[in-house]
């Protein structure tokens, strides 16, 4: 469980609770929130969100804006926790997140960020073995 403001986010169960009440949001909106939580206050670019939440899919930026708006609507009084950095991306603010229990990354549906060396795993392994 992660506490942010008055919210309790359960990544393993994909739930958000505010004052004990379950907030209903779509799966993509939850994935965006999860990505922002895992960034720990750092800026997450629009491109990174699009690549991680909609992998291998061509999606208009408007879709991201719609899901951010839905997420803010569900957060109600905590909507200001999601800050838009114009032209760049989004950040989750509002103090330090408190983790009551370790988050199990295996339950995440987010796609891992691609490495800078795509398709070079074998070559890198050979170079490392030669060292």
Image (cartoon, rainbow, N blue to C red):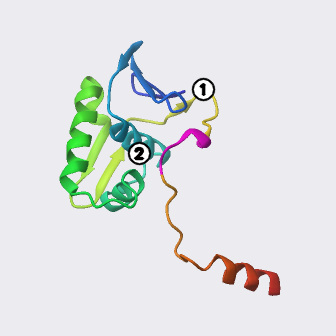
The residue tagged 2 is: 36
Q: Is residue 10 above or below residue 53?
A: above
Q: State the CA–CA distance, disc 1 to disc 2.
A: 18 Å
Residue found farthest to the right? 130
Count of picture labels = 2
Residue 107 painted magenta: yes
Write the residue at 42% across / 55% down.
52
Residue 47 point in image, percent of width and height: 33, 62
Neighbourhood count class around disc 1 (C-alpha, 10 Å): few under 14, some 14–19, many 20 upward: few
| Residue 23 position by quadrant | top left
Q: Earlier in the sequence, mark 1 or mark 2?
A: 2
Residues drawn in magenta: 105-110
Residue 80 point in image, percent of width and height: 27, 35
In the image, 34 versus 7, the foreground residue is 34
The answer to whether any part of residue 25 appears in the image is yes
Q: Is residue 76 above or below residue 114?
A: above
């Amino acid at each position: 469980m992660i506490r942010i403001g008055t919210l309790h986010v359960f990544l393993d169960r994909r739930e958000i609770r505010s004052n004990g009440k379950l907030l209903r949001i779509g799966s993509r909106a939850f994935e965006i929130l999860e990505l922002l939580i895992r960034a720990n206050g750092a800026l997450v670019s629009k491109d990174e969100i699009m690549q991680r939440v909609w992998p291998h899919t061509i999606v208009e930026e408007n879709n991201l804006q719609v899901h951010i708006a839905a997420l803010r609507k569900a957060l109600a009084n905590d909507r200001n926790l999601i800050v838009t950095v114009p032209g760049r991306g989004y950040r989750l603010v509002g103090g330090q997140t408190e983790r009551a229990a370790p988050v199990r990354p295996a339950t995440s549906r987010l796609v891992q960020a691609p490495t800078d060396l795509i398709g070079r795993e074998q070559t890198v392994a050979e170079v490392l073995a030669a060292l």
